Image (tube, rainbow, N blue to C red):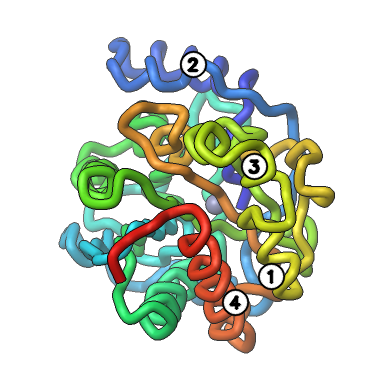
């Protein structure tokens, strides 16, 4: 569901975090410079999945709560909102003092995206003969939201290890991709309930793919051979279109792409994808993953030379 951040919300979140935690973490410094607008979006849950949206059992095993895989390709797959597991001893977040709703405090999951992320890993391996890096949350968003700064991502300290595992591995994977390949592609997978047939791009309107644009020009982000241009060619309904248009407010890219994007020296080119339900429901996930893998292959061919 809504995963983009917006400047007003971030200011509000920051203020809340300060009041609630009585401590300012260094990580807040990464929040400067976000740019999006207000957004009203509906929940990203899939039809018919609500009854099993939260697992009956809980676990404190962080290896189970956050799946991590070190890959062999300059590609990183992240999926923070598709999980259903409870975290042992952790009550549901309350979001006290925070604005409720998708753009503020929100606990709805992005149905099907945990499974989709795993399908994408398989499809990329099938297409390219090697697996991408990945970090996938299996915890329900009620307990943990990895796409938020730590101060507002969880409310119980027992959820902290899972949050830290998510981000420590995103960081480690980006570091390794940079040192091995000099750059790469970070795809953060989400689900939105606004348009079932559309996939929205979130890059902070080009910010999180800054290195790509510097090296290859604006066309690499807005042209037919851009990542979303390729997906359009492969038959997806993408937004924005034309690709140089403004990204949909609310879907312009959240904390994860803003943290690991290439506008930072230590980042790589990062794109948030907000999938409509038709792309992530059980019947279509495999096909979605196959198309995404094809797009990744074509993209790497053009922009990320690496030893096959
Ligand atoms: Zn999401």
**Which residue is most to the bottom?**
283
Q: CA distance from mark 4 to mark 2?
A: 35 Å
97 lies above or below 113: above
Q: Residue at x 53, y 61 (%)?
A: 299
> Which numbered disc covers residue 277?
1
The crowding category of the residue bearing disc 4, from other C-alpha atoms within 10 Å (few below 14, some 14 to 19, many at least 20), is: many
Q: CA distance from mark 2 to mark 3?
A: 21 Å
Q: Residue at x 56, y 61 (%)?
A: 110
Secondary structure beneath disc 3?
loop
Eye-nearest disc, 2 or 3: 2
Q: Residue at x 19, y 45 (%)?
A: 161
Can residue 305 be seen here? The reply is yes
Dot placed on the residue nearer the N-terminal end, 4 or 2: 2
Quadrant for the C terminus in the image = bottom left
> Which numbered disc covers residue 32?
2
Dot placed on the residue nearer the N-terminal end, 3 or 4: 3
Compare residues 281 and 70 and report the one nearer the observer: 70
Secondary structure beneath disc 2?
loop
> Which numbered disc covers residue 170?
none
The crowding category of the residue bearing disc 1, from other C-alpha atoms within 10 Å (few below 14, some 14 to 19, many at least 20), is: many
Q: Which residue is mark 3?
A: 102
**x and y percent of residue 260 in the render?**
39, 38
- Judged left or right of residue 255, residue 102 is right
**x and y percent of residue 18 in the render?**
39, 12
Dot placed on the residue nearer the N-terminal end, 1 or 2: 2
Compare residues 124 and 94 and report the one nearer the observer: 124
Task: Classify mark 4 as within 8 Å of ligand 1 or not, answering yes or no.
Answer: no
Q: Which residue is mark 4?
A: 291
- Judged left or right of residue 230, residue 157 is left
Q: Residue at x 43, y 51 (%)?
A: 186
Q: Are the residues at dot 1 and dot 2 in contact (C-beta closer than 8 Å)?
A: no
């Amino acid at each position: 569901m809504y995963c983009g951040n917006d400047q007003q919300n971030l200011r509000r979140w920051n203020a809340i975090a300060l009041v609630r935690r009585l401590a300012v973490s260094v990580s807040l410094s990464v929040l400067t410079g976000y740019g999006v607008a207000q957004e009203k979006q509906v929940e990203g849950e899939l039809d018919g999945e609500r009854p099993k949206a939260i697992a009956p059992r809980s676990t404190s095993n962080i290896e189970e709560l956050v799946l991590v895989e070190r890959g062999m390709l300059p590609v990183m797959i992240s999926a923070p909102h598709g999980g259903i597991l409870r975290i042992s001893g952790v009550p549901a977040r309350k979001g006290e003092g925070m604005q409720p709703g998708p753009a503020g405090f929100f606990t709805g999951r992005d149905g099907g995206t945990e499974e989709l992320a795993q399908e994408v890993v398989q499809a990329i391996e099938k297409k390219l003969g090697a697996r991408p890096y990945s970090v996938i949350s299996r915890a329900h968003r009620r307990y943990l939201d990895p796409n938020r700064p730590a101060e507002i991502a969880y409310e119980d300290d027992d959820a902290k290890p899972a949050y830290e595992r998510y981000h420590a591995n995103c960081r480690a994977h980006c570091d390794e991709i940079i040192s091995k390949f000099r750059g790469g592609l970070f795809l953060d997978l989400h689900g939105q309930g606004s348009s079932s047939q559309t996939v929205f791009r979130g890059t902070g309107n080009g910010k999180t793919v800054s290195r790509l644009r510097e090296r290859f020009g604006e066309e690499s982000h807005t042209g037919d051979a851009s990542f979303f241009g390729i997906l359009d060619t492969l038959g997806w309904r993408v937004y924005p279109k034309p690709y140089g248009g403004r990204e949909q407010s609310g879907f312009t890219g959240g904390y994860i792409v803003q943290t690991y994007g290439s506008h930072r020296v230590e980042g790589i080119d990062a794109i948030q994808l907000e999938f409509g339900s038709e792309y992530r429901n059980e019947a279509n996930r495999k096909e979605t993953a196959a198309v995404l893998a094809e797009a990744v292959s074509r993209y790497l061919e053009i922009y990320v030379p690496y030893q096959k």
